[in-house]
């Protein structure tokens, strides 16, 4: 038996459409994917990163299984360096939706004091994200994990399947991917092997924002512009979110009206100066600017083709 | 331009309202190597302003480093994603790209032009509404063009754009264009493809991609993007009879029982009478449930949850269909198969078949022919290799509701999954059901296996001895049977050599024949177990897949795989029948262990190491195992 969802979480009904719009087609496809995993896998989990894509994915899950609560837990792989506003938002969402929230921290990494300031982004991401994720999947024995990645984000994502097979060592082999035809997803695997499943594969950044806007999906306030304390470091605006951030001699935090296009570990996530403090204003700004979304993420700059390599090693 | 910057800046609310009503077009681009596919897609992304400044900076740097355009912007680099591809300068897998205009969102499946990558094109085509077939104006219609067009036709994409590229290299000549289009139409007509729009363009220079070309005033038709923006997206699905393959049964509490799925065809209204297939039971739609509130009706393409007004048994894999126009139900089909994996498709082999939301076993019965995709001729074949396309018959382990692929992609398309590797091995299209499948039914008999076995005072089972030639299977099987007979058990021994003298004397030793050999023996063993016998099978049975197929014919606890484990060197040293010597001399082809593989059992019920046990001890250990499993009383 699945538990029933709390009432009143979803916006009021719209009539059944004559022809489907692009968002309606995307929504129906994502719901189909979510249900297919629940029907075919024994122990699925939804990776919840607290960002806008996770919020949309979670919203779609609430729709897919309504009136039941989605029959899987949320998993947050916590590097311990997220923005404080993200932690608050995470806990409030899980509580409101009545879903189980698992939080996993790489305890070994924590014991060694791994962090972005002391060890650099590459080591931090590898230990606290990639390895931590593998630990969590192994520890709980999940055989399928939903992720909110989109194919338009980055070139190696563009070739990844919606049902993306992983070996027992969590490795992705871009040259041995299963062909994916029609809406027939092959979820078969042996014990120990697993799937990463990406229900938002065919969504673009604009689709996600538009859907957030239309469906009034809650998002972390950091996406909206506000006065925040930042320092300018190596060409990026880094928010001073807590006392763990060591300031260089010439750095003085100053209040600037900024927002974030993506959310991750605060020391690795650059802000942009912006006046956009409503959803339409964000979308407007996004359409008029000419810088891609992942540019704010420090991790992609580390090496050419770095995302493809990270993914082969088990990063989402 | 693609996004109306002015409107965005002036009135974002109005802009969003327009965006809300955009439609979606999925298309595939196909062409040969160097036809300029990646350049064309890169150009579409660039011109629809989806290339951001940082990507442009990266592109400029990459163009200087590895570009093929002498340092100028090489748009192909925008879409050639994986590191390996950048090094080789080719596209090696299906990639999906996104761009949108004020009218439409587009999803492009970018597929490679290499002959060996047919599987990628079929994959990309399976979700496409339209195909853009690229032709190099200098080269005209090539073998690959024919192949791509055949695949587009096979997968049932209704609309084709013939994009004659590199017009700049033929002096923007109308005569060249007309000649190519003429050739192509002749060829396409033979396939039955008629909805073709031909556009002359130059992706490198942008002619007729977005804006009309100034170099080709003789062409009055739409540019590529204009065509893609206005071509009608098929809405015919909604007009078909209602079909909903049930994905998941939603039971949050005792009061609610909903059937969730994506509507594959037609429209459903509250109160409609539906039939559940294959069971044939009926009920009326009580509610159409969505999280946004109940609906009065829902149509093809929507993911919904239905409840019925009566208690009807419905589970995943069933199809809810309009009661007055239900699909047929059958368990044998003729189907067209596209083979997608290295390991070939063999006649007689059993695969998992996923169609709709149902997964079941399907056995390949005769392979009728292979299609030569270059000449479209039918060729005799005994197997399908990677990228082969063929027509075969399939026998399922139970009946399913279906429609011909030409009627419904959702109820007529399927994938075949390799049961050992779990790889997606093939894609298939149901052509029609075989009539015999609708008329032959399994006859339920009053005297059953349990009763027959009880009369003999035993439990029926099969001992399946597998191992290399000369491993000692027959010797051990003979000893086991003697002991069982002495204990008053009713047995039968099926020996590989003996069966090949009669039932299987028409079979040789090729991989296909080995598969068929085992299939027949497994079926005979099943009948004998049904007769209540303890059956011993002594067969090399080298392939895991066939041993598993045999195992699946029996109930749990009835099948004992006995691995007679003798190392190759030892079997060859013994060489009782002199066969290894012959095989080494090349006088025996396809000899297991020499030039044909033996796939070692992974988890046999009984493992006999013949280097540690003699035949008598081995037989004893098998008898002891049967006693421990209560198949026979302690002996």
Image: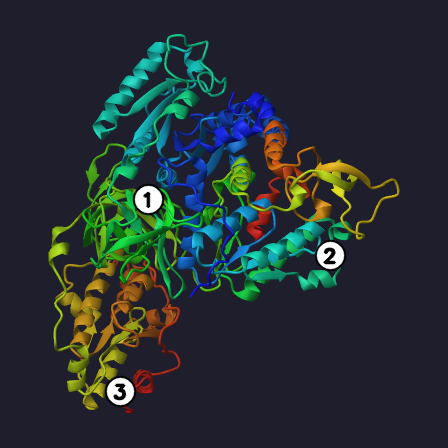
Q: Position of residue B91 (x, y in %)?
A: 47, 35
Residue that carries the numbered disc 3 in the rendered image? B632
Q: Nearer the viewer, mark 1 or mark 3?
A: 1
Q: Position of residue A237 (x, y in %)?
A: 75, 38
Q: CA distance from mark 3 to mark 2?
A: 62 Å
Q: Nearer the viewer, mark 2 or mark 1?
A: 1
Residue that carries the numbered disc 2 in the rendered image? A114
Mark 2: secondary structure: loop
Residue that carries the numbered disc 1 in the rendered image? B297
Question: How was the colour assigned to the protein in this rendering?
Answer: rainbow
Q: Residue at x 26, y 42 (%)?
A: B408
Mark 1: secondary structure: strand
Q: CA distance from mark 1 to mark 3?
A: 61 Å
Q: Position of residue A224 (x, y in %)?
A: 66, 39
Q: Residues within 10 Å of mark 1 (few under 14, many from 20)?
A: some
Quadrant in the picture for the C terminus of chain B:
bottom left
Instruction: Say if mark 1 contacts mark 3, CB within 8 Å.
Output: no
The answer to whether B68 is drawn above or below residue B93 in the figure is above
Q: Position of residue B513 (x, y in %)?
A: 22, 58
The answer to whether B257 is drawn above or below residue B119 in the figure is below
Q: Is residue A123 visible?
A: no
The answer to whether B182 is drawn above or below residue B317 in the figure is above
Q: Residues within 10 Å of mark 2 (few under 14, many from 20)?
A: some
Residue, far top: B217
Q: CA distance from mark 2 to mark 1?
A: 55 Å
Q: Quick check: do tags 3 and 2 share a chain?
A: no
Q: Residues within 10 Å of mark 3 (few under 14, many from 20)?
A: many
Q: Residue at x 45, y 9 (%)?
A: B215
Instruction: Using the image, name the chain to which the residue with label 2 belongs.
Output: A
């Amino acid at each position: 038996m699945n538990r029933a969802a709390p009432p009143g979480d979803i916006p009021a009904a719209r009539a059944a459409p004559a022809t489907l719009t692009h968002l309606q087609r995307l929504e129906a496809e994502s719901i189909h994917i979510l249900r297919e995993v629940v029907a075919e896998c024994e122990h699925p989990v939804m990776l919840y990163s607290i960002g806008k894509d996770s919020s949309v994915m979670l919203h779609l899950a609430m729709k897919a299984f309504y009136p039941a609560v989605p029959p899987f837990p949320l998993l947050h792989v916590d590097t311990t360096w997220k923005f404080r506003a993200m932690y608050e938002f995470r806990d409030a969402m899980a509580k409101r939706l009545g879903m189980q929230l698992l939080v996993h921290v790489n305890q070994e990494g924590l014991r060694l004091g791994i962090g972005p300031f002391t060890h650099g982004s590459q080591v931090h991401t590898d230990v606290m994200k990639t390895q931590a994720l593998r630990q969590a999947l192994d520890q709980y024995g999940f055989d399928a994990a939903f992720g909110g990645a989109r194919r338009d984000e980055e070139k190696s994502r563009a070739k990844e399947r919606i049902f993306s097979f992983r070996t027992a060592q969590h490795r992705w082999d871009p040259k041995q991917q299963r062909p994916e035809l029609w809406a027939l997803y092959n979820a078969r695997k042996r014990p120990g092997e697993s799937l990463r499943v990406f229900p938002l594969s065919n969504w673009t950044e604009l689709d996600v924002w538009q859907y957030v806007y239309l469906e009034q999906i809650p998002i972390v306030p950091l996406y909206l512009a506000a006065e925040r304390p930042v320092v300018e470091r190596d060409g990026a605006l880094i928010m001073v979110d807590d006392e763990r951030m060591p300031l260089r001699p010439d750095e003085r935090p100053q209040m600037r009206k900024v927002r974030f296009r993506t959310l991750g570990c605060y020391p690795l996530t650059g802000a942009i100066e912006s006046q956009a403090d409503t959803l339409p204003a964000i979308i407007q700004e996004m359409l008029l600017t000419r810088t891609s979304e992942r540019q704010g993420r420090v991790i992609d700059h580390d090496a050419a083709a770095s995302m493809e390599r990270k993914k082969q090693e088990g990063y989402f | 331009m693609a996004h109306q910057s002015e409107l965005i800046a002036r009135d974002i609310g109005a802009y969003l309202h327009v965006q809300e009503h955009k439609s979606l077009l999925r298309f595939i681009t196909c062409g040969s190597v160097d036809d300029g596919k990646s350049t064309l897609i890169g150009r579409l992304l660039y011109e629809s302003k989806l290339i951001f400044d940082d990507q442009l900076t990266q592109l400029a740097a990459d163009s200087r480093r590895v570009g093929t355009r002498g340092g100028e912007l090489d748009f192909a680099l925008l879409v050639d994603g994986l590191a390996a591809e950048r090094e080789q300068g080719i596209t090696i897998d299906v990639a999906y790209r996104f761009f949108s205009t004020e009218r439409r969102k587009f999803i492009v499946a970018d597929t490679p032009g290499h002959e060996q990558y047919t599987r990628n094109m079929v994959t990309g085509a399976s979700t496409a509404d339209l195909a853009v077939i690229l032709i190099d104006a200098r080269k005209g219609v090539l073998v690959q063009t024919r192949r791509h067009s055949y695949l587009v036709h096979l997968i049932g994409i209704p609309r084709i754009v013939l994009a004659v590229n590199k017009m700049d290299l033929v002096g923007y000549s109308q005569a060249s264009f007309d000649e190519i289009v003429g050739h192509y139409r002749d060829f396409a007509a033979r396939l039955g493809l008629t909805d073709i729009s031909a556009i002359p363009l130059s992706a490198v220079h942008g002619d007729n991609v977005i804006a009309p070309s100034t170099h080709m005033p003789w062409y009055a038709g739409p540019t590529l993007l204009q065509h893609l923006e206005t071509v009608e997206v098929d809405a015919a699905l909604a007009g078909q009879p209602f079909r909903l393959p049930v994905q998941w049964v939603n039971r949050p509490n005792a009061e609610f029982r909903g059937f969730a799925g994506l509507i594959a065809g037609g429209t459903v209204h509250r109160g409609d009478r539906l039939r559940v297939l294959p069971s044939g039971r009926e009920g009326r739609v009580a509610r159409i449930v969505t999280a946004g509130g109940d609906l009065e009706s829902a149509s093809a393409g929507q993911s919904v949850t239905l409840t019925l007004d009566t208690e009807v048994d419905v589970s995943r894999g069933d199809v809810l269909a309009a009661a007055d126009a239900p699909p047929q139900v059958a368990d044998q089909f003729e189907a067209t198969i596209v083979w997608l994996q290295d390991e070939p498709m063999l006649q007689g082999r059993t695969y998992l078949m996923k169609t709709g939301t149902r997964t079941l076993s399907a056995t390949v019965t005769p392979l009728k022919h292979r299609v030569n995709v270059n000449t479209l001729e039918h060729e005799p074949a005994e197997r399908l290799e990677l990228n082969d396309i063929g027509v075969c018959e399939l026998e399922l382990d139970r009946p399913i509701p279906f429609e011909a692929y030409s009627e419904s992609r959702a109820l007529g398309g399927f994938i075949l999954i390799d049961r050992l590797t779990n790889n997606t091995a093939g894609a298939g299209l149901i052509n029609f059901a075989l009539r015999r499948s609708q008329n032959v039914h399994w006859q339920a008999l009053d005297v059953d296996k349990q009763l027959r076995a009880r009369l003999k005072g035993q439990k029926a089972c099969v001992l399946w001895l597998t191992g290399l030639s000369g491993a000692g299977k027959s010797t051990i099987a003979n000893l086991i049977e003697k002991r069982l007979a002495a204990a008053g058990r009713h047995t039968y021994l099926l020996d590989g050599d003996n069966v090949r003298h009669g039932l299987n004397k028409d079979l040789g030793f090729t991989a296909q024949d080995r598969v068929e050999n085992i299939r027949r023996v497994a079926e005979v063993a099943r009948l004998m177990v049904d007769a209540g016998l303890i059956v011993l099978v002594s067969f090399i049975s080298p392939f895991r897949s066939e041993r598993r197929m045999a195992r699946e014919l029996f109930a749990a606890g009835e099948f004992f795989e006995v691995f007679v484990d003798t190392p190759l060197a030892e079997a060859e040293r013994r060489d009782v029948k002199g066969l290894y010597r012959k095989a080494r001399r090349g006088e025996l082809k396809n000899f297991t262990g020499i030039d044909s593989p033996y796939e070692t059992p992974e988890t046999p019920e009984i493992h006999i190491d013949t280097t540690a046990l003699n035949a008598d001890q081995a037989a004893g250990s098998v008898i002891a195992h049967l006693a421990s499993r209560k198949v026979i009383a302690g002996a």
